[in-house]
Amino acid sequence: MTHFLYNLLLTGLLLFYVPYRWIQVLLGKRPRSLLKERLGGYPDLASKRPLWVHAASVGEVLCCIPLLKRIRTEIPDLTVLLTTMTSTGRETAKRLLPEIDGVLYFPLDHPLLIRRVLKRLNPRLLMIAETELWPNLLVRSGRRSLPVVLFNGRISERSLRGYLWLRPFFKRSLHAIQLFLMQTEEDRGRIITIGAPPERTEVVGNIKFDQIPPPLETESIQELLASLKLQGNEPLLIAGSTHAGEEEILLDVFQDLRKAHPSLTLLLAPRHLDRLAQVEKLLIERDLPWERRSHRSAQKGSEAKVILLDTMGELMKLYRLGTLVFIGGSLVSIGGHNPLEPLFYKRCVLFGPYMFNFLEISRRLTAEGGAVLVKDKEDLSAQLRRLLSDEKTRREIGEKGFQFLQRHRGATDRIVDKIRPFLL
């Protein structure tokens, strides 16, 4: 009954979705490919039997990179297709994964559209990153005896409560998955609680530890500094993937810190670029000198002490330049973002109390001295002030974070070992 109601709701939404997206296409606000692919307009790859990997957005795409490069190296003749939910995820995949055969938008989870996509692709294996549990995709895959593997699986404590309300609904879908490759024992226990067969679940670790940081040689670092109008000797605070409610805190703290550290520069990177105008308003209200990253790189000189990052795909390499790095989404109840990326460069990382999307990683990092947990605005200000004046402690925290990262690598190898029988 619940699946019937779900499909009925999808059908109703589809009646509004198609004309809405079509108007956006006609107005030039959305590409034609978005509507076409959302409605299952996929190329006919049935004879090639591709590997289909689904990664929802930028974060999931980035963690897939070492896995897909490894698969391409091992099985060069295999056709590989990646789907994403977002345009930013799609563009990131096209830029960083030129070796795969196609990047498409994920179809709407309507049974007729899913049936059409599965018929046109006829994949040999469907791999789903983290927790993209689309009921019709899973049920239809089960009917076709299509092997499905959930990899880098995670279920947060907050998500678990929501899934439990609909446990009978999701249990049927979960039984279509052949293998659940989870990040931690806690994630394994939660997916079993929702309805996954215990004998199909395994802990293989977090593939995010295996991300490949952009290589930056000395010459490239100097070019990057020059494009930001930085000398390289001024302290740089990077606030990555921030959200509404955090920028206000960070800007107030930054203004206070500059009294003792007048050369301090802030690189502020909102998680969603459609919020740039909101953040600019905050900067204007505080009378802070600022520039957008794209404008700054095009100008000869600048006195701005706040750089607003308005480009995609640069944040990870910019972490290399940071004196201190704050992880956004953690001072407000968002759940935090990936704290591992700055650790590749041995940066000193700080985050707030709301890290439930990376709960085990954040707990272990702080327990091992590889990151600093701040409770609130006042604690953030105090910790930043302390660390800006203590290079030795910054280096020690960065080194411990890097060693933590190295100890937990290897999930890619374990995942490849598990899926190899489905691909050969």
Image: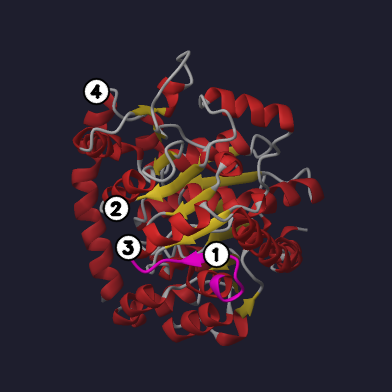
Q: Say which quarter of the image contains residue 366.
A: bottom right
Q: Say which quarter of the image contains residue 102.
A: top right
Most foreground residue, 108 or 291: 291
- Helix, strand or loop at label 1? It is loop
> Which amino acid type is shown beneath numbered disc 1?
Ala
Q: Is residue 123 visible?
A: no
Residue sitting at the far front: 260
Question: What residue lies at 45% left-to-right and 39% top-to-bottom?
Answer: 264
> Which amino acid type is shown beneath numbered disc 2?
Ile
Circle 2 or circle 3, nearest the eye: 3
> Which amino acid type is shown beneath numbered disc 3?
Glu
Which residue bears the numbered disc 3?
Answer: 378
Whether residue 39 is situated above or below residue 400 in the rendered picture: above
Q: Distance between the residues labelled 1 and 4?
A: 47 Å
Which residue bears the numbered disc 4?
Answer: 27
Instruction: Categorize mark 1 by other alpha carbons within 10 Å: few (<14), some (14-19), many (20+).
Output: many
Which residue bears the numbered disc 2?
Answer: 249
Residue sitting at the far right: 74
Most foreground residue, 49 or 316: 316
Per the rendered image, the range of residues in magenta is 366-377
Circle 4 or circle 2, nearest the eye: 2
Q: How far apart are marks 3 and 1 (CA)?
A: 18 Å
Measuring from the top left, give residue 175's x and y in whole percent: 50, 77
Question: What residue lies at 57% left-to-right and 76% top-to-bottom?
Answer: 367
Circle 3 or circle 1, nearest the eye: 3
Whether residue 201 is situated above or below residue 83 in the rendered picture: below
Q: Which of marks 1 and 4 is nearer the N terminus?
A: 4
Asked whether the beta carbons under mark 4 and mark 2 sit within 8 Å of each other, the answer is: no
- Helix, strand or loop at label 4? It is loop
Q: Which of marks 1 and 2 is nearer the N terminus?
A: 2
